[in-house]
Image (spheres, grey):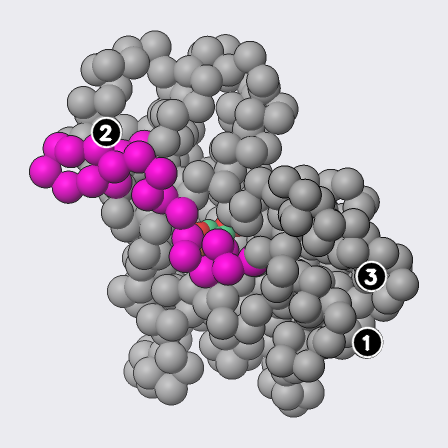
Amino acid sequence: DAEKQAYKERIKVLLREKNAVLVAHYYTDPEIQALAEETNGCVADSLEMARFGRDHQADTLIVAGVKFMGETSKILSPNKKVLMPTLEATCSLDLGCPVDEFSEFCDAHPDHTVVVYANTSAAVKARADWVVTSSIALEIVEHLDSEGKKIIWGPDRHLGSYIQKQTGADMLMWQGACVVHDEFKAKALANLKQQYPDAAVLVHPESPQNIVEMADAVGSTSQLIAASQKMDNETFIVATDRGIFYKMQQLAPEKTFIEAPTGGNGATCRSCAHCPWMAMNGLQAIESALTDGSGHEIFVDEALRHKALIPLDRMLDFAQ
Ligand code: 13P
Ligand code: SF4
């Protein structure tokens, strides 16, 4: 509508004026993803967002996603200003992994290599030997296992168990979960599969094991999007945040995408799988961040940043 269009136009001017670029995650609302595309920013998974921000010439990155994504950008680009539409946008995995408790857990197992998911605070990353995102986690754990390393994994227990099953690695798990993916229900999914017998099931590995077991493809957001293009099926049932449908539908307009059910007791709940924190990234919040950066800027303590950069760079070097 007209009001949204006016916001978009003002944001475009501000981006140019401030030499800023919009970096958005696939789970943000479709209008935010479209705006990132229209302004030559990027729409990506958490690994690619980190790389794009680091390599871009802009003076300012405006990161539409959740806080750990802004922090990762700042760790990699200390000389850029990193703004977020709101600093309130967190993640249940980050919240469920406080650094003091996690450090104690690590200290109790000093012979283990500490591997943490990118969905953590800068302080937790600083305590880790490796940072991984879901698109590279499997390969990195495979590599560590081949070197005979025992692993502490945190914080997502479902992603951790999936990787453990795939690799057979020796892994001690932190018991975190994603509030969005944890809600997918196997019984309701089985019912939906019966309704659409030719549909392929695409699952993000933050989902519970019984959902992952029903998948035709398991992977990070970018890997699921690639699978939806590559596979011949006409219909897909997708177990991840519904923000991803924007890109899937854009790349394969002739295909049909259906949300995996999140309701309990066999009931289905459509449109439930949407991260409440990703949803905070609205047009108004972006405009406000670009107009008056105060209260929107990400700062990371310099000593902490140096420590967190080591495991992050390890991942980026490995991913090359
Ligand atoms: P990706 O790394 O797959 O983009 O996932 C990030 C995330 O927050 C998933 O819930
Ligand atoms: Fe965190 Fe889950 Fe939201 Fe991703 S979808 S940011 S893992 S709460």
Question: Residue at coordinates 50% horizontally, 11% vertically from top-left?
Answer: 232
Q: Which residue is mark 2?
A: 189
Mark with earlier residue (3, 1)? 3
Q: Report which quarter residue 56 is drawn in.
A: bottom right
* Image marks 3 and 1: residues in contact by CB distance under 8 Å: no
Q: Amino acid at mark 3?
A: Leu
Q: Amino acid at mark 1?
A: Asn
What is the CA distance from the residue labelled 2 to the residue labelled 1? 47 Å
Q: Which residue is mark 3?
A: 14
Residue 42 appears at what percent x and percent y?
72, 47
The mark lying in front, picked from 3 and 1, is: 3
Mark with earlier residue (2, 1)? 1
The mark lying in front, picked from 3 and 2, is: 3
Residue 290 appears at what percent x and percent y?
74, 67
Majority secondary structure of magenta residues: loop
| Span highlighted in magenta in the image | 260-281
Q: Which residue is mark 1?
A: 79
The residue furthest front is: 2
Question: Residue at coordinates 26% horizontally, 47% vertically from top-left?
Answer: 183
Q: Is residue 170 above or below residue 33?
A: below
Q: Is residue 298 visible?
A: no
What is the CA distance from the residue labelled 3 to the residue labelled 1? 20 Å
Q: Nearer the viewer, residue 208 or 95?
A: 95
Q: Is residue 75 left or right of residue 201?
A: right
Q: Nearer the viewer, residue 185 or 274?
A: 274
- Crowding at dot 1, Cα within 10 Å, few <14 / some 14-19 / many 20+, comes out as few
What is the CA distance from the residue labelled 3 to the residue labelled 2? 44 Å
Question: Residue at coordinates 68% horizontally, 81% vertically from top-left?
Answer: 294
Circle 1: element type = loop
312 is within the stretch colored magenta: no
